[in-house]
Image (tube, rainbow, N blue to C red):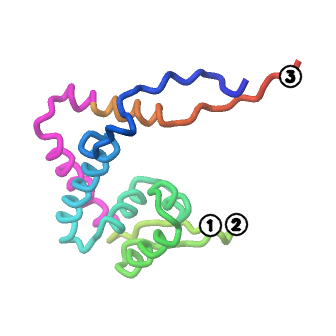
Amino acid sequence: MTSSRTPPPAAGFYSPTQMQPENSVGYLMRKVMTSIRTQADAQLASHDLTYAQWLPLFKISRCTTTTVASLARDLETDPASMTRALDRLEVKGLVTRERSTTDRRVVQLALTPEGEKVAAQVPPVLADVLNGHLSDFTHDEWQLLLSMLRRMLVNGKPPVPTSASSP
C-alpha cells in the first residue's frame, strides 16, 4: 500500500488538443496576480518600494521571527535574490540582520522603526487593490472564490505515502 487515501479521478476539464490560455486557470491566476502586483507597485512607488522590497517588508512585519532562509522559502524565491532585496532594504534603513549566536548560518531579520512605518503602508494598499479586483463580487462570491482556491491547493498536493504495515 502506497497511500492512505485513493486520489479522486482527474477532472477532465482540459485536454492537450484544446488548451487555450484564455481558458486556463493557471494562466488566468497568473494574469490576476500580475495585475495585483502592478497596481500595488504603482501605489507603493511613492514609498520608493518595488514588489521585491515591499513583499519581504510586509512578511517580516507579520512574523515574530524571520530568517533569510525562511523568508526566501515563504516567498518562493532563491536565497541570493532575497539577499539582494534585503541589502536594498538595509541600505534604506528599513531592515536589520542579526546573526544567531548559537548558529552562525542563521540570520534573523527585524524591521527598524522606520521599516515598521513603511511596512504599515502595505496593508491599506493591498486591501485597496484587492477590493478593486473584487469590486463587482458579492460577499458570497468572494467566499466561494476563496473556498475554491483553497480546494485547488489541497487538490494539488500529492497523496501522502504511508509505509506498508509489517505482519
The amino acid on which the numbered mark 1 sits, given as a three-letter code, is Val
Instruction: Indicate yes or no whether the magenta region holds residue 142.
Output: yes
From the viewer's perspective, is the residue at label 3 or at label 2 nearer? 3
The numbered mark at residue 102 is 2
With respect to residue 46, does 38 lie above or below?
A: above
CA gap, disc 2 and disc 1: 9 Å
Circle number at residue 166? 3
Residue under the image location 39 percent in, 33 percent down: 150
- In depth, the one of 136 and 87 nearer the eye is 136
Circle 2 Cα neighbour tier, 10 Å, few/some/many (<14 / 14–19 / ≥20): few
Give the percent coordinates (x, y) of residue 151: 40, 30
> The residue under label 3 is which amino acid type?
Ser
72 lies left or right of 161: left
As drawn, the residue found furthest toward the front would be 17
Secondary structure under tag 2 reads loop
Inter-mark Cα distance, 3 to 2: 41 Å
Which residue matches tag 1? 106
Query: Does label 3 or label 2 sit earlier along the sequence?
Result: 2
Closer to the camera: disc 2 or disc 1?
1
Tell me which numbered mark, 1 or 3, is placed earlier along the sequence: 1
Classify mark 3: residues with Cα within 10 Å, few (<14), some (14-19) or many (20+): few
Q: Which residues are magenta?
A: 116-144
Residue 70, x across and y down, in percent: 54, 58
Which three-letter amino acid code belongs to the residue tagged 2?
Thr
